[in-house]
Image: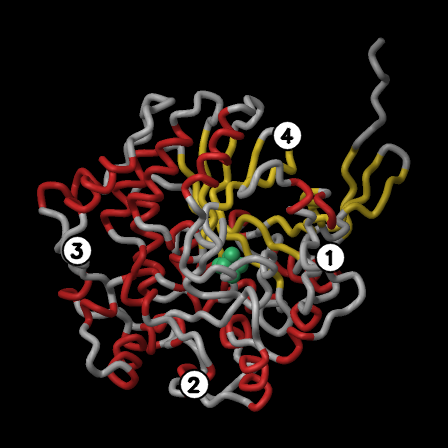
Amino acid sequence: MTDQFALGSAEERAEDEEPPGLRAFSRTPQFSRPSPVSPIPLALLSESTALRRRAVPRLVVSERSRWFRKRFYPSTTTSEWNDWHWQNRNRIRSAEQLARLVRLSPDEGDAIGRHSGPLPVGITPYYAALLSEDDPAQPLRRTVVPSSAEYVRTPGEADDPLGEDAHSPVPGIVHRYPDRVLFLVTGFCSTYCRYCTRSRMVGATGERSVHKSDLERALAYIEATPQVRDVLVSGGDPLTLEDERLEWILSRLRSIPHVEFVRIGSKAPVVMPQRVTPALARMLRRYHPLWMSLHFTHPDELTPEVQEACGRLADAGIPLGSQTVLLKGVNDDVETMRRLVQGLLRTRVRPYYLYQCDPISGSAHFRTPVARGLEVIRGLRGHTTGYAVPTYVIDAPAGGGKVPLLPDYVLGREGDDLLLLNYEGRAYRYPDPSLPVAC
Ligand code: SF4
């Protein structure tokens, strides 16, 4: 981490939203909660959440963010900057807005100008502060600023390469594996990734979230499908929903007897860490067992703000995993990936999956050969903590599911010995006689 991300003052770090008496309690995870729970009516939730929603909490602000805010948003207060609603409202959505913050290349300007349809430009001011002002090839900038390569469709690409639409029994549900479903609760994200697997649909309706009647139909499907024991709440980004809407969804899911646990997939803690308020963490902890998959791409995303947000979720007892897409020129070298996965462990996030980039239309400029991914995994396994090594997978086209990929560590057999290669490239024998099969 460089000096530009140094911590803000102790005063700015103070969580003055919680009365002191509550702090010790809220930081002690409570895991045992009877299941299932009774759903809470949305009207009641709105009331209680409105009562809970007090002043914007005071969160850490890095030196970089402070400098950026003073330079480009001089009339914005720290309190506004730390308000996720402000971040959301002021996200950068046009070439003109972006050109105020960075020197756009002709290609970027042209690509933004040509854009129409889903996957619009959207970047929170917080995340924009992390972008290079001059370098269009900077990894973070490439992931959120369009380029003309997005408009080039190559053989094998498709708008829906995973066949999600074909596995959708009702709107908002993708049912690919027998015992679990994907529940798409919004099509909105505060920041849009240019390689998004759901680029065919995200951002298509602006901030309008999925209609309640569609959520009800999806919930009815889960209720009527007893083999579903695990629900991944995704989108778009579910953490762009207001607390009360999210709580209503979680309480409904946790009231279904056969739903054993719920996962939330989100990039909000990375692109808008202000979203992870103490109030959100307190609400989420009521719905354990609850897991979270966060979407990290590059070590430069591991700012003090993100570390605070992830710490708050971890303190609420939520196991955090990272899903990272392998992206050409962004994170496809061992050194960058090593910095990312080791930084994630320090941030209390377990690197979970490393995805080979899906063949989405217009993504060839982001895709690496599979051999590159294997090289990255080989450079991690044995060279760093085992917890830091994600499982490298290809999500098989047309709904085939995740297929794990491993470098070849088994050289073959010699008699009763298995010939193995260790992380240093040295060969070893392991006695592995063929045992007689019992009748
Ligand atoms: S946050 Fe997730 S859903 Fe949203 S654009 Fe990025 S990858 Fe797609």
Q: Which quadrant does the N terminus fall into?
A: bottom left
Q: Earlier in the sequence, mark 2 or mark 1?
A: 2
What residue sits right under mark 3 in the picture?
Answer: 15
What's under tag 4, amino acid-wise? Pro
Mark with earlier residue (1, 4)? 4
Q: Nearer the viewer, residue 184 or 385?
A: 184
Q: Is residue 311 visible?
A: yes
Q: Are marks 2 and 1 in contact (CB under 8 Å)?
A: no
Q: Is residue 43 left or right of residue 273?
A: left
Q: CA distance from mark 3 to mark 1?
A: 50 Å
Return the residue at label 2: 96
**In the image shown, does 346 or 207 lie closer to the viewer?**
207
Dot 2 surroundings within 10 Å: few (below 14), some, or many (20 or more)? few
Q: Which residue type does callout 3 highlight?
A: Glu
Name the residue nearer the viewer: 197 or 208: 208
Quadrant that contains the C terminus: top right
Dot 4 crowding, Cα within 10 Å, few <14, some 14–19, many 20+: few
